[in-house]
Amino acid sequence: MRRPVPAPAPEADIDAVDQQLLTLLQTNGRASYAELARQVGLSAPAVHERVGKLESAGVITGYTAVVDPAAVGLGVTALIGIIDSDEVDDVGMLEAMSDLPQVQDCWRTAGTEGYVLKVRVTDIPALEDTINALNRVRGVSRTRTTVVLSTKWEGRHGRSE
Amino acid sequence: MRRPVPAPAPEADIDAVDQQLLTLLQTNGRASYAELARQVGLSAPAVHERVGKLESAGVITGYTAVVDPAAVGLGVTALIGIIDSDEVDDVGMLEAMSDLPQVQDCWRTAGTEGYVLKVRVTDIPALEDTINALNRVRGVSRTRTTVVLSTKWEGRHGRSE
DNA sequence: TATGAAATACTTCGCCC
DNA sequence: GGGCGAAGTATTTCATA
């Protein structure tokens, strides 16, 4: 029951080589241009220019080291749904959530919960602090917390082809 | 209502310079050793050795380019909770979910939902396909899908100090 | 986009603190 | 042990076509 391949990404014209570069850089963000060049069969300057264009076009928004949370003392992960009250001060709510650095992800969602957050904290008391802080935010009516027992994988890339 | 600073990460001895390097590399994963050296006030070889040790110790697990999903045609994000049935074939379920590349994150959770997934697909029909595929997985009793309207931020780093 | 050249950076080594 | 300086090698980056 496989549908035909959907839209071919009309946003920017990303050809096969660009796609390949994106995959390589998602797999190893520190790969040198020379190494990338070898893998895609182009010269290093050509790769350099292509990657630069992908960055300028906003396709690549940055590069980051992936750090094991537990290794830096962040032993507890949780997903927190935010049920907002009638009073919707979206801007203020976002600011308040953004002020909590333990909120690593923030999604605006459809459904009974207006936002879902992924938070990472050192331990359960710190999770309690976070929940308390969120419940004090103006516009938050209630929260629903789901504790993550283990992260099977995270930030995986790759399309459904 | 601030608790005292919790555990100082007993896993590995990460000193202030290491912490600084981690932050710099999370902010710019392609920063050169020379640039990192300038920022932390050490020589390039010293930084090279420190980063190498952080990688060997598993503190840094990799480097990745951050790609705008919309720019590569992934316009729909959703969070899907998995309600598992009595028959718990954990290994088989994980394999089946892992076989779906659109499942970018997979968390084992406490609560009524045994897993929560973050999926990214091209469009709503592809989301429907994904939900159907998940519901066919042996051990999955029901799914609950929350569509993400917009991603406010994702993968933010930084501790709650 | 490729080539070649100059500047920079990476990486290993011995040495020092 | 951890960091520094210097050396050789590789890479980046610019010119040019």
Image (cartoon, coloured by chain):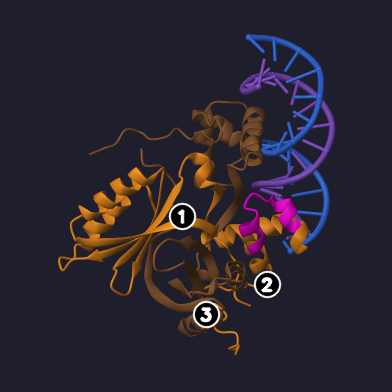
Chain colours: A orange, B brown, C blue, D purple
Q: Which residues are the magenta region?
A: A23-37
Q: Amino acid at mark 3?
A: Thr
Residue A99 in view of the camera: no
Can you say which quadrant of the picture contains the N terminus of chain A? bottom right
Q: CA distance from mark 2 to mark 3?
A: 25 Å
Identify residue for label 2: A16
x, y percentage for residue B144?
A: 40, 76
User: Left or right: A124 with respect to A150?
Assistant: left
- Label 2: few (<14), some (14–19) or many (≥20) C-alpha neighbours in 10 Å: few
Residue drawn at 76 percent across, 60 percent down: A39
Classify A101 as above or below B131: above
Q: Are marks 2 and 1 in contact (CB under 8 Å)?
A: no
Judge if badges 2 and 1 mark residues of a common chain. no
**Nearer to me, B23 or B13:** B13
x, y percentage for residue B37?
A: 58, 31
Identify residue for label 1: B155
Judge if badges 2 and 3 mark residues of a common chain. no
